[in-house]
């Protein structure tokens, strides 16, 4: 079916109106036929009675004293032909028209007349048969059969049908025109909205003014505005990503170009090797920065696709992330201590993003620690699911604990040789926000190091007799 709302409305409105017209015409025809038949049948009986009133019994003979003028009246009413016959009880025709078929059956005296449809000379006729007493005749009774063509009946039915159906047809036609005009007028606000959107520039993602929107499409416009807002946020994230990438890569690329130019001019092989090692270190930092920028962009995008989240066990995710980070902890001589409860720690989320969150927290805890330091990792399952990572390193000053979640912000005053882009905790914050989790930073045990606590909503388990289902 055509996707036009106007055409669909007209289609679904025309069907019931047309059906109503057909049903009304059929009912009108049946009622008109019933009442017309009843009316003319009564008149036909009256005619039969008139014929019966002209019967005379003379001895053993039955005669019909029907004046020529009266017979002419019966036979010609300007529309129908009239026929009559009189029969003896044993079937002998006593008087009347020869070409009218003899009755096959007749009612008893006093019983209702018999009506039937027949045909004479190719014309449809209505026949009435009655029986009357003839006490002066040895026969005792006679059968009277009268018939007339149906022209008047048909004309009356047609007049009744035309008188009712034609006005209905006119009314329905007017109604269809009115509905079409009404639909066009009713849909005009949608045309205005369409025109307003069509006139916008590709950069204009502002919401549509709902004050000019009809109530029937308010929900649609709200959904459209929500889509525009998500598109605007997505474009903003892309622009921010491009800006962040440009900001972070411009200086390292310029440095790498400088080192390459120096290496090109240098003749001392050892100095060339040193310059190349510096370039390799710079490329490693750039690679790590790009990876973190991509992770940050992915974390921001995760907020818009929470419908794909499913229950996952945080114990398994943290255990895998801890296993992956072991080589770096060994290199920096930092001990890892992972503890988890025996029960599942189910949270609603994306396992890859949660693993990225854990990895970034562990990397920060290891890098901002000293050789011989310790990083404790705990997953608790109580009223909430908590991931706690605590180190005994340099710590984060209280005044900077809120700012460390900003992009490219790095803690000042560190005497450790640590390279980084300041994106790790920004990634943690975005992933936590996408999972409706909170991140809290405090000092570690005995006032040393840093304690980061990520608080997740708990996924409860509903059990019944047949199945176990996550809700």
Image (cartoon, rainbow, N blue to C red):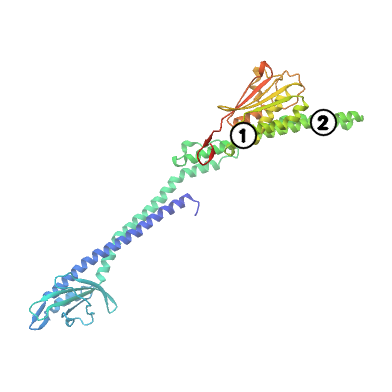
Closer to the N terminus: mark 1 or mark 2?
A: 2
Visible in this render: residue 238?
no
The kind of secondary structure element at disc 2 is: helix
Q: Quadrant of residue 297?
A: top right
Left or right relative to 110: residue 359: right
Q: Is residue 336 left or right of residue 40?
A: right
Q: How many marks?
A: 2
Query: Dot 1 lies on which element?
Result: strand
29 is higher (above) or lower (below) than 106:
above
Q: Find residue 225 and report its horizontal and vertical position in percent.
A: 53, 37
Residue 391 in view here: yes
The one of 397 and 469 positioned closer to us in this rendering: 469
Q: Which mark is residue 325?
A: none
| Residue 157 horizontal/vertical position (percent) | 27, 65
Task: Answer with the quarter of the image where residue 120 lies.
Answer: bottom left
Out of 229 and 57, give the one closest to the viewer.
57
- In the picture of the structure, the residue carrying the numbered disc 1 is 313
Of residues 380 and 51, which is closer to you in this image? 380
Near mark 2 (Cα within 10 A), the count class, few <14, some 14-19 or many ≥20, is many
Q: What label does residue 279 carry, if any? A: 2
């Amino acid at each position: 079916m055509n996707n036009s709302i106007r055409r669909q409305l007209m289609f679904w409105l025309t069907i019931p109106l047309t059906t109503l017209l057909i049903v009304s015409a059929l009912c009108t025809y049946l009622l008109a036929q019933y009442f017309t038949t009843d009316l003319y049948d009564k008149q036909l009986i009256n005619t039969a009675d008139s014929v019966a009133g002209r019967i005379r019994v003379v001895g053993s003979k039955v005669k019909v004293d029907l004046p020529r003028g009266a017979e002419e009246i019966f036979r010609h009413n300007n529309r129908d032909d009239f026929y009559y016959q009189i029969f003896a009880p044993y079937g002998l025709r006593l008087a009347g028209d020869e070409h009218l078929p003899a009755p096959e059956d007749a009612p008893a005296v006093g019983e209702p007349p018999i009506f039937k449809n027949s045909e004479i000379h190719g014309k449809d006729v209505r026949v009435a048969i009655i029986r009357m007493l003839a006490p002066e005749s040895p026969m005792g009774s006679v059968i009277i059969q009268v018939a007339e063509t149906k022209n008047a009946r048909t004309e009356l039915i047609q007049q009744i049908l035309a008188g009712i159906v034609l006005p209905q047809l006119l009314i329905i036609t007017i109604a269809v025109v009115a509905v079409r005009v009404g639909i066009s007028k009713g849909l005009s606000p949608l045309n205005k909205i369409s025109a307003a959107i069509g006139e916008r520039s590709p950069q204009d993602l502002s919401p549509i003014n709902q004050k000019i929107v009809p109530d029937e499409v308010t929900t649609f416009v709200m959904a459209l505005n929500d889509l525009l807002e998500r598109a605007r946020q997505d474009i903003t994230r892309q622009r921010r990503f491009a800006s962040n990438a440009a900001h972070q890569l411009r200086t390292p690329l310029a440095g790498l170009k400088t080192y390459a130019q120096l290496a090109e001019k240098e003749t001392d092989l050892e100095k060339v090797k040193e310059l190349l090692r510096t370039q390799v270190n710079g490329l490693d930092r750039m690679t790590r920065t790009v990876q973190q920028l991509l992770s940050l962009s992915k974390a921001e995008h995760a907020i818009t696709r929470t419908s794909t989240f499913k229950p996952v066990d945080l114990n398994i995710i943290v255990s895998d992330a801890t296993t992956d980070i072991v080589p770096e902890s060994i290199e920096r001589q930092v001990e890892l201590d992972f503890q988890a409860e025996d029960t599942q720690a189910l949270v609603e989320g994306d396992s890859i993003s949660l693993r990225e969150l854990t990895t970034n927290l562990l990397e920060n805890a290891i890098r901002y620690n000293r050789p011989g330091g310790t990083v404790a990792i705990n997953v608790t399952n109580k009223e909430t699911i908590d991931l706690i990572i605590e180190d005994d390193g340099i710590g984060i000053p209280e005044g900077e604990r809120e700012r460390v979640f900003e992009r490219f912000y790095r803690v000042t005053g560190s005497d450790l040789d640590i390279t980084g882009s300041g994106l790790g905790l920004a990634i943690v914050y975005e992933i936590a926000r996408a999972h409706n989790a909170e991140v809290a930073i405090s000092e570690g045990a005995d006032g040393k190091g840093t304690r980061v606590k990520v608080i997740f909503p708990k996924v409860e388990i509903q059990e019944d007799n047949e199945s176990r289902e996550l809700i």
